[in-house]
Amino acid sequence: METRKPPSGRDIWQAVRQELTANLYTLPFSRLAPTVYHVYLHPDDFETIEGIVPRLVEEISKAVEQEIERLNAETSRRGRLRGMLRTRPDEPAIEAPETLEIVIQADRDGEVQPGAFGIVSRLMVPATRDFVGLPTVRTVKTIVADGRRTSTVVEGPAARRATLAYRDEVGEQVIPILKDLVKVGRGGSGAWADVQVFSTQKVSREHCWIIRDDSGRFFIRDVSVWGTSVNGQALPPAVRSPEGTVSEPGAQAELPLMARIQLADALVIDFRVEAPS
């Protein structure tokens, strides 16, 4: 059986670039680009690049900014030519995003095969031409495999904001949830924590995951040694190998709009969801 090579960093960037150019949203005086790009690799492929993911994210973020500058310069040159020829008006410039979220992670749902990868991009779309009402989010799910690109577009209401509030050894903390997958724990060598808490070793380096789905609902999964509970109810524990490493996170449970998440008996986190303003 043919062994497929993991996607290279350049492969991933070219796919992100395609998502950027293919999903621009045109307004009367500007064009909006997706501001969120989540890249999913087969777990085996992700393992081969895990050590350089921060560097890859940094370079792709810079490449997105430069690509927007390049496209705007190209649009400006075409506009000057059309002005001289008195042809149709030029396209508006692409608005540079204030924030850019690029995440590269392993696919845990079995949707991505070795050698392929998926991209989920999101673009905030104004509700009406005059910006009245709540915005919606246009989500594009793309699978890139064997040189082919297959995309599905979904539009839905803007995601609700959520925060995590707690007091650890450093002090009071209020952390907004900005990603679809947030890992909570002490962090450290070989364990990434999006929300790094400073507490006793009863809190695992990677303790629980908080997940936001496409409909805006939030879920939680336990990946700890000493357990996680929500409003006093223990979550299903993670499945561990004979060596003690996590082979499968615990079954996910939906989080209510307000919840108290307890990490072992060491730390309590107040979870809160607000409607979009």
Image (tube, rainbow, N blue to C red):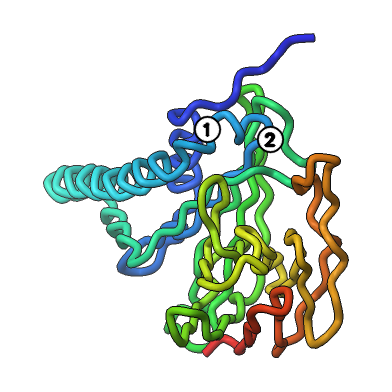
Please give the name of the residue rendered at 82% of the width and 86% of the height, measured from the top-left corner: 232
User: Quick check: 254 above or below 98?
Assistant: below
Q: Can you give x and y, in whole percent of width and height, for residue 170 in the image?
A: 43, 79
Q: Is residue 41 left or right of residue 255?
A: left
Residue at the outermost top position = 1
Amino acid type of the residue that numbered disc 2 sits on in the rendered structure: His
Please give the name of the residue rendered at 65% of the width and 25% of the height, measured from the top-left corner: 115
Badge 2 marks a residue whose secondary structure is loop
User: Quick check: 198 above or below 82?
Assistant: below
Q: Can you give x and y, in whole percent of width and height, for residue 8 in the image?
A: 50, 26
Q: Which residue is mark 1?
A: 49
Q: Is residue 36 left or right of residue 93?
A: right
| Label 2 Cα neighbours within 10 Å, binned few <14 / some 14-19 / many ≥20 | many
Q: Which residue is mark 2?
A: 42
Q: Can you tell which mark lies on residue 188?
A: none
Please give the name of the residue rendered at 78% of the width and 68% of the height, measured from the top-left corner: 227
Amino acid type of the residue that numbered disc 1 sits on in the rendered structure: Ile
Could you tell which of marks 1 and 2 lies nearer the N-terminus? 2
Q: Can you give x and y, in whole percent of width and height, for residue 143 in the image?
A: 66, 38
Number of dots carrying numbers: 2
Instruction: Examine the image and state in which quarter residue 245 appears.
Output: top right
Q: Mark 1 vs mark 2: give the one in front.
A: 1
Towards the viewer: 82 or 27 = 27
Please give the name of the residue rendered at 42% of the width and 57% of the height, measured from the top-left corner: 33
Q: Is residue 229 left or right of residue 177?
A: right
> Disc 1 versus disc 2: distance between alpha carbons?
11 Å
Q: Assign the N terminus to one quadrant of the image.
A: top right
Q: Can you give x and y, in whole percent of width and height, for residue 254 in the image?
A: 80, 75
Residue 149 visible in the snapshot: no
Towards the viewer: 183 or 90 = 183
